[in-house]
Image (cartoon, helix red, strand yellow):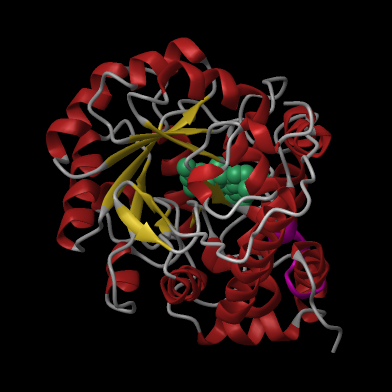
Amino acid sequence: MATMTCIEDLRGRARRRVPKMFFDYAEAGSYAEETLRANRTDLERIKLRQRILVDVSQRDLATTIIGEKVPLPLALGPVGLTGMQHRDGEIAACRAAQAAGIPFTLSTMSVCSIEDVASSVDKPFWFQLYVMKDRGFVRSLVERAAAAKCSALMLTIDLQVLGQRHCDVRNGLSVPPEIKIRNVIDIATKPRWALGMLMGKRKTFGNLAGYARAGTDVSSLASWISTQFDPALSWRDVEWIRSLWPGKLILKGVLDVDDARIAATTGASTLVVSNHGGRQLDGAPSSISALPKIADAVGNEIEVMFDGGIRSGQDLMRALALGARSCLIGRAYIYGLAAGGQSGVAQAIEFIRKELDVTMALCGVNSVGEIGRQVLASG
Ligand SMILES: Cc1cc2nc3c(=O)[nH]c(=O)nc-3n(C[C@H](O)[C@H](O)[C@H](O)COP(=O)(O)O)c2cc1C
């Protein structure tokens, strides 16, 4: 079997192993995918500054994220339907993250439920919350996250309405896949995935199943979800969530300086500069282009995390240089998961760790705290 050397290799293997419907779901951005592409091209445009003959023999990648000690400034972000990329995908990804000593975030839209994951791993994980119209359901999710001893709540605030991904419409994305000739043929060519799925714990939205008002069958769950995102969501709801969750709160999906200033007054520990991986407002700026302005404006008041387009340790370095204290990855670990389950996620994390380590050395820095704009060729 081919040796994996980087995230792109894992992506290639993921494409071969996972049914097209789910590979496309992970890969895609909304509408014309301008923002999705900008996330990558704007990162690639940032050049790093090579320094020579600096003693870099004492390199240390360790830092803290929301006060939690981590061996590198990285966490796994929330990704819906992770459990459709690989059997019990959320559990596998969480185990890989915990073995690497970094946080894992479970999505509201996960396949394995909060309780499934909590009972399968050793340490606390983070829970990502979508505020649905049904506030009773939201409250129950927050209570379940607290009962499962989640160490942070990540509130996603950039999804009041859903951006469309054309491929999901064309592929007829459904969970589990509908029995259509096209899907059957596709799945028949992915026997490893199909066998794994048959043995997995769950095959639908684990956190929502059994919720009385949502119904239990898949199609009523899916239609309930699509009507549940709340266009009326406002900063007042953030206050309400704050009152329900006294623990660490992370606000994910900030792309504008004015919004960042408000976020910094909410009592949240952290904000994530993010455009949802190019899956929401198409035409929005890349995450990396928004980062320095936000970090300059509020970086002293609230911890700033970043996501969008990170596929390597070099990308991580670029984001740290522009003011992020740490980063989330989405697709980079999903490729690993789809390619090889828990060990594929472990590989993805390890690729990025090693790349960051070498990049720090070649830029002449020994610690994450030293990384600033001086590591960029453009200053
Ligand atoms: C397939 C997929 C599903 C996602 N699902 C969620 C989700 O349920 N909740 C959320 O807050 N963000 C979700 N995101 C956004 C990610 O948390 C993250 O912001 C994004 O993936 C970062 O970009 P990257 O994939 O280029 O690293 C999803 C992203 C992808 C690719």
Task: Give the left or right position of residue 366, taking residue 305 as reference.
Answer: right
- Magenta: main secondary structure: helix
Q: Nearer the viewer, residue 332 or 46?
A: 46
Tell me if residue 4 comes above or below residue 358 in the rendering.
below
Along the line of sight, which residue is nearer the eye, 29 or 103?
103
Q: Residue at x 27, y 54 (%)?
A: 211
The spot of residue 10 in percent (x, y) is: 76, 69
> Furthest-top residue in view?
258
Q: In the image, is 165 to the left or to the right of 90?
A: right
The answer to which image quadrant residue 259 occupies is: top left
Q: Is residue 371 above or below residue 237?
A: below
| Residue 362, image x, y percentages | 75, 54
- Which residue appears at 41% of the width and 20% of the height? 298
- 344 sits to left or right of 50: left
Picture quarter with the C terminus: top right
Q: Quadrant of the N terminus?
A: bottom right
Q: Residue furthest right?
A: 2
Q: Using the image, determine if residue 216 lies above or below residue 85.
A: above
Image coords of residue 73 (percent x, y): 49, 53
Which picture quadrant has residue 59?
bottom right
Q: Is residue 42 left or right of residue 110?
A: right
- The answer to whether any part of residue 233 appears in the image is no
**Where's residue 132, x and y in %?**
34, 35
Magenta stretch contains residue 137: no
Residue situated in front as seen by the camera: 323 or 372? 372
In the figure, residue 130 lies in which quadrant? top left
Q: Which residues are magenta?
A: 16-23
